[in-house]
Image (cartoon, grey):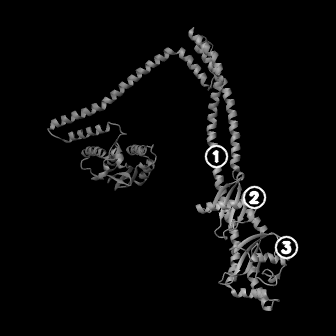
Amino acid sequence: MKNKTIFEDFSKKYHSTSIRFFVRSLLVNSLLMLIPLLLIGLYSIFRTTNESTREAEKKASLILNQADDIMETFYTHVDNAYLFFASNPRVTLQLKNAFEEPSLSLDSIKSVENISLNFQNLIYTDDYLRNIYVYYKNDYSRIFVPLSSKLISFPADSEEEVLASYHHAGSEDVWMDISDEPLLYTEYRTPSLLIYRKLYRRTTDIQNGLVIFSFSADKLKSELNHLLEYEDQKLFMIDSANRLVWPSSEELPAETLQDLAAQMDAVSGQTGAETINQDFQSYTATYLHSPRSYGFSYILLTPKDKIYQTAISLTSMYVIITLAAILVACIISFFKTQHDYKYLGKIINVFSMPDTAITRMEPPRKRSSSPFEYILMNVIRLFIEQDYLKMQDSEKAAKLQLSKMQALQHQINPHFLHNTLNNIYWESVKLTGSENKCSQMISYLSAIMRYSLSDPQEDVKIQDEINYLKKYLEIMKLRYADKFDVEFRIQQDCSIYPLKKMLLQPLVENAIYHGIKEKDGNGLIRISVHRKKGRIYFSIYDTGNGIPPDKLAEIRSDLKETNKTVNQHIGLANTNSRLVLSYGQDARLYLNSCCGRFTVIWFSIPGMGDEEREN
């Protein structure tokens, strides 16, 4: 009655714990789903973010270098024009004379036309280059235009701009400017990128002229924008005086960009890096200071949301999947808790009223996988089959005792055989009064049995294995007198290395039975052991009948399959399997033979270090 009261109290309380069971089931199911999802999701987001960052940095560096290549082409034209005038003083003199003449003479007109030919080919072949102007200070408001092969006069206001450029302050020899106004009234109004280059008197620092290259700003802008990889990506160019000369967008103040360029230039000077990446507002700024284009620098601003667009999408999808997984876990946990509690009630009834519950218990459904149903049936068997289980335990104990006795008997038999051989040995000596062939064979056989009775997987020293092999060969030489000689070539420092027991004896036995025994006359068996490059090499060489080529190929093929018996050479197959299982595939047997002359079989095992051998 006391037990019944306890179970009744328990049945009243277990319903109040259903919420805790639900929470526990939810945690278990959530962890099973969320842990792999969390690890895979976080790893995917982390790797995607890193790859997006590296890809964006690589693309940004490529864009800046391509932009620098375009500008380098422009400045190459400017430098070539400067070198043309610097290396041809006669051309400069002819052109200056033409500027100073009130009315151009026929010689000056021819000189101007000849000089124009040097520049017209460049203008016609370069899509960016619109025109070239050469100016020497004169009293007639003239400027040399090679495209028209003329000295053209321009309005006073345009001349003031050219004179301002001519007297450009500072130490810069080359500078750049963006202008929407044409230099000449005969030209169309279109944005132009103007690059100015001072001309000097030969071998002096006195300025005597100015060359101006006019490039199409629209084409340059189109080309630079074509380089951009992301939407809203912005490219800026800053000259050596830290002036913003090429804005691809006016959304950012020039002062802000100049400060950013100064900061990144300082970092570039410390690291020596070609490109520098830095966070800037909602952009990733990439900076390149060109060592070629007269100290020009480039800043590329890439929107972060464009760089990490894939990572952001992946994160959003990951959050949705996680929420869905939690919802599924809640549903599974609810139904699992309801299902489990139904069987828990039945189990409580069995413990509280076993006799009544057993008689009313329905048989289990077929293919049922509920663990509680199995628990319930085992509880019933616990009450029904107690005596049967006790009988089974007694029977198992008896069988275990019998097995122990049989094992002890099997342990006795080998020792009995070894002791019997010793008795036969002494009886043989007693009959002849001294050592004889019979007693020697019995002595060797007794030593072989004592060596082979222990665990075959035991490690022994190579010297012990050689000693055992010598006793075996002595018995075989007594059996096959004058049939073969034995030669050992054992490297001195190899004798103490460990080796699995009885690996060499089957190989020597194979050499005797399949090589030496069938041969007419005397043969030789040579056993070699040496060390090379951290491995111990073993070889058994015999001068027996050898193996025919087709048979040799078959044995080699079979030895590659460690679980296959090699026809008559069972010793080879077993030894090969033991070597592979103990030392790996590199230790398998290798075989070579010449029919009628010799057969050699070899293998190698890893050599241990000196410290391992001492231990």
Badge 1 is on which residue? Answer: 44
Which is nearer the N-term, disc 2 or disc 3?
3
Rendered view: 428 above or below 183: above
Say which quadrant the C terminus sits in: top left
Camera-near label (1 vs 2) is: 2
Residue at the disc numbered 2:
252
> Mark 2 is on which residue type?
Leu
Q: Quadrant of residue 499?
A: top left
Residue 527 seen in the current view = no
Q: Residue at x 66, y 69 (%)?
A: 295
Residue carrying label 3 = 188
Q: Position of residue 201 (x, y in %)?
A: 69, 83
Spot the residue most to the top: 1
Crowding near the residue tagged with mark 2, few <14, some 14–19, many ≥20 C-alpha atoms within 10 Å: few
Q: Secondary structure at mark 2?
A: loop
Q: Earlier in the sequence, mark 1 or mark 2?
A: 1
